[in-house]
């Protein structure tokens, strides 16, 4: 079965962030034989003075294939109880893919522009039979974890922070389109004006690949390069990725 596993508000100003925790949790899921992790994504939520958050108010979602739901829930719960930072408000959501409906997608979209409550998050999760639990502090991380599940299922929000096959930060240099897809499980490579890049075209991915989630596919966005002697395309800037994924 395919599960969307999301966490939120696991850190404090001195600790490692939620993205790191998501990647670490994903490694444990694989290492302990509980499931296969397809990808991990980051989702930006509403930044407002009345919403407590550590630095960016982002949550993370793992897509996990597993036939061991009880073991998956136990591992993720115990991990957050053990690793969530002092002063955090950690929340965990585990949703079977077919249970994520339009209401949950709407919750995710609302969480990007509204102040929501943990009471309503639990009500919605209970109605759908979805696991949702808070572990530390005020436990308001349930709001963002439920939102991440909806946003990832909708497939047009956020960016990948881990893809099956290779750590994104380890991918640097110049690749053909086919090489890049092979080593990183990237599904689409396209230009800023939506031109699909051919498998034989050369791309400079820079020193940190930042794929976005578009049309439910992990997508690398590129732009024309001035240095066309060695490659035709280059990965767009970090600022551009933020502008289209936040």
Image (tube, rainbow, N blue to C red):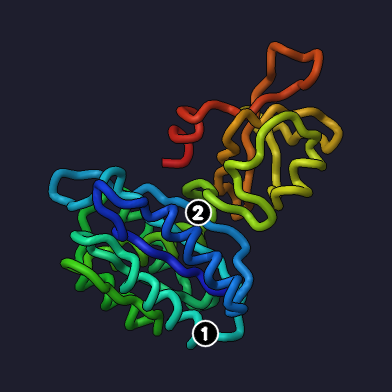
Q: In this view of the protein, can residue 1 be seen by the observer?
A: no
What residue is shown at x 46% (from left), y 75% (from top)? 95
Asked whether 201 or 125 is in front, the reply is 201
Q: Nearer the viewer, residue 42 or 27?
A: 27
- Residue 42: x and y, percent? 45, 51
Q: Quadrant of residue 147?
A: bottom left
> Residue, x 48% and y 88% (percent of image)?
70
Q: Nearer the viewer, residue 123 or 223?
A: 223
Q: Where 120 falls versus 129 (above or below)?
A: above
Which one is earlier in the sequence, the residue at label 1 or at label 2? Answer: 2
The correct choice, above or below, for 223 with respect to 47 in the image is above
Q: Is residue 135 left or right of residue 201?
A: left
Q: What residue sits right under mark 2 in the picture?
A: 41
Which residue occupies the foreground of this view, 86 or 152? 86
| 10 sits to left or right of 178 | left
Visible residue check, residue 90: yes
Measuring from the top left, give residue 130's x and y in whole percent.
40, 80
Q: Quadrant of the C terminus?
A: top left
Q: Which quadrant is home to the N terminus? A: bottom right
Residue 138 coordinates in the image, percent (x, y) = 16, 67
Question: Label 2: few (<14), some or many (≥20) within 10 Å?
Answer: many
Give the percent coordinates (x, y) of residue 50. 13, 49
Is 2 located above or below residue 117 in the figure? below
Residue at 75% x, 41% y is 180
What is the quadrant of residue 76 in the picture? Answer: bottom left
On residue 69, the disc is 1
Q: How many marks?
A: 2
Q: Against 172, is 154 above or below? A: below
């Amino acid at each position: 079965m395919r599960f969307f596993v999301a966490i939120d508000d696991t850190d404090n100003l001195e600790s490692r962030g939620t993205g790191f925790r998501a990647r670490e949790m994903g490694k444990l899921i694989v290492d302990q034989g509980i499931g296969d992790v397809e990808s991990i994504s980051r989702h930006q939520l509403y930044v407002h003075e009345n919403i407590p958050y550590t630095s960016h108010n982002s949550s993370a979602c793992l897509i996990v294939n597993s036939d061991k739901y009880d073991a998956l829930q136990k591992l993720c719960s115990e991990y957050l109880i053990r690793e969530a930072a002092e002063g955090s408000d950690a929340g965990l959501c585990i949703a079977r893919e077919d249970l994520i409906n339009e209401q949950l997608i709407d919750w995710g979209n609302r969480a990007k522009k509204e102040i929501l409550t943990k009471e309503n998050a639990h009500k919605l999760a209970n109605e759908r039979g979805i696991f949702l639990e808070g572990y530390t502090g005020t436990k308001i991380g349930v709001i963002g974890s439920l939102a991440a599940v909806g946003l990832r299922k909708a497939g047009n929000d956020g960016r990948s922070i881990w893809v099956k096959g290779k750590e994104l930060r380890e991918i640097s240099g110049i690749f053909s389109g086919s090489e890049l897809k092979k080593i990183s499980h990237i599904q689409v490579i396209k230009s800023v004006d939506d031109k699909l890049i051919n498998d034989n075209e050369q791309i400079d991915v820079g020193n940190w690949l930042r794929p976005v989630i578009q049309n439910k596919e992990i997508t690398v966005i590129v732009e024309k390069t001035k240095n066309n002697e060695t490659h035709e395309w280059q990965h767009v800037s970090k600022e551009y990725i933020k502008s289209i994924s936040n």
